[in-house]
Amino acid sequence: MSRLPNLFVLALGITTLLLGVAYGVATRYQMAAERQVMLQQVAAVRPQFDEAKSIDEVPTTTNLADAEDIGSENRIATDRDAKASVPAPNSLRRLGIGRPALPAEIAAWDVDIMPDGHGLPEGRGDVETGEAIFSDYCASCHGDFAEGVDNWPVLAGGFDTLAEDNPIKTIGSYWPHLSTVWDYIQRSMPFGSAQTLDEDQVYAIVAYLLYSNDLVDESFALSHENFADILMPNVAGFVVDDRAETEYALWRKKPCMQNCKESVNITMRASDLDVTPEPIRLETSTTHSDGEVSDKDIVKNGQKVFKKCQTCHQVGAQAKHRVGPHLNKIFGRVIGGLEDFRYSQVFDVAAKEGQIWDEESMAAFLLEPRTYFQGTKMAFSGLRTADEIAGVIAYLKTYSD
Ligand code: HEC
Ligand code: HEC
């Protein structure tokens, strides 16, 4: 009896999965076209925002449908045959909520770099500079030569392995466009400290990565001017599978934009629904009903919390340096004080000044590592609660005697 519902759930699961994959593939191709239309719409309405002196003055009649004609070639959400006098579909009409994004806000989001170099800021960086930055900010995970430490991604080599059973897909062997490398690093690396690099630093790192992949020589400098000249080895390796018998064709049908609802009714607001979570507060709460917490419990809790640190730190008799230094006898130790570990500059400075780890500095550091030591290469956003911090401190103390 119970097999039937199980099978049903399984089938449902598989269908959902397949639909998800198909949707993902289809949206990828739609996105480029949509982006084009959006850019044209933005360009069309932008002058009105620029002229308005404050948000209140942004003309309320601004209607994206006015901008629609410009993108008529690429129009996606409207009926191609509709005459200009036909009112814009609801999806483009103002709903009386929110406000138009300001040019500066759009600019802050509009940071992507296209394969032809469109979107690149001006800047320049050479291999040598890149090597130094890479060794400070990236090598702890990706290796000095971009060869990858432990399981962290390999960024160099792997040429001629793509057809093998275990291809080594690096930015050199696999990525079709250099723009993705620039964009990815600028957006998301160093892991945990995203967007802390300036433009010249990113150019320098990308130059160094080209060098690590034997694509340029050591005197090379990369800039916005020569960027588009760099062709990646695998540029011809990606093709759109547009065969009629694949699902691609299914997703290219004209969307139905007929018999749309006349009006939009807002039935509930997020603030009424009370869906916004309360901010997390720092307060100690592990008190037993009798108001006592045993030291043992705190240490035990700390051991659990330390799992978050274990990817990078070890403690105990066999402890070695991993991405971060071992933490034996950390209390009373000079900050950044281990000879055989390569610290960031801020840690080197602290060590020179002879600063010592105590409970207070540790608590402040673990709450907000990158505020307490600006420029630290510890890619960790911090612990959330006083309990967690007290726990980890108590746990580390058991390795400090
Ligand atoms: C704390 C470890 C760490 C540091 C430091 C770090 N990365 Fe990464 N990097 C990662 C991880 C993890 C991924 C994979 C992320 C993912 O797949 O979501 C990654 C992915 C990448 C990739 C994409 C690799 C691929 O083939 O998909 C590039 C390129 C990269 N990092 C460059 C850099 C650069 C440049 C720096 C220094 C500015 C840096 N990383 C610093 C951990 C790190
Ligand atoms: C993603 C890797 C990573 C994680 C996760 C991480 N750390 Fe670190 N940690 C580092 C690195 C790298 C350094 C060296 C910092 C520097 O040089 O800027 C460091 C430094 C430290 C130091 C200073 C050591 C010294 O010799 O002065 C302490 C203490 C520390 N981490 C504790 C922790 C604790 C506790 C956690 C977990 C709550 C944690 N870290 C999580 C990577 C990590």
Image: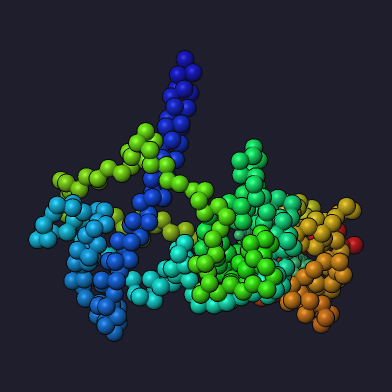
Asked whether, in this view, residue 41 is left or right of residue 279, the answer is left
Vertical relation: 122 (above or below) 330? below
Vertical relation: 354 (above or below) 251? below
**Ligand 1 lies in quarter:** bottom right
Most distant residue in the left direction: 85
Regarding residue 92, the answer to whether it shows in the image is no
How far across and down, in percent of the image, does residue 394 sit? 78, 60
Vertical relation: 385 (above or below) 56? above
- 286 or 170: nearer the eye? 170
How far across and down, in percent of the image, does residue 243 sit? 38, 38
Asked whether, in this view, residue 49 is left or right of residue 28, the answer is left
Which quarter shows the C terminus?
Answer: bottom right
State which quadrant residue 65 falls in.
bottom left
- 239 or 279: nearer the eye? 239
State which quadrant residue 93 falls in.
bottom left
State which quadrant residue 391 falls in.
bottom right
Residue at 17% x, 59% y is 88
Vertical relation: 71 (above or below) 125? above
Residue at 58% x, 51% y is 174
Regarding residue 138, the answer to whether it shows in the image is yes
Asked whether, in this view, residue 197 is left or right of residue 84, the answer is right
Residue at 30% x, 69% y is 42
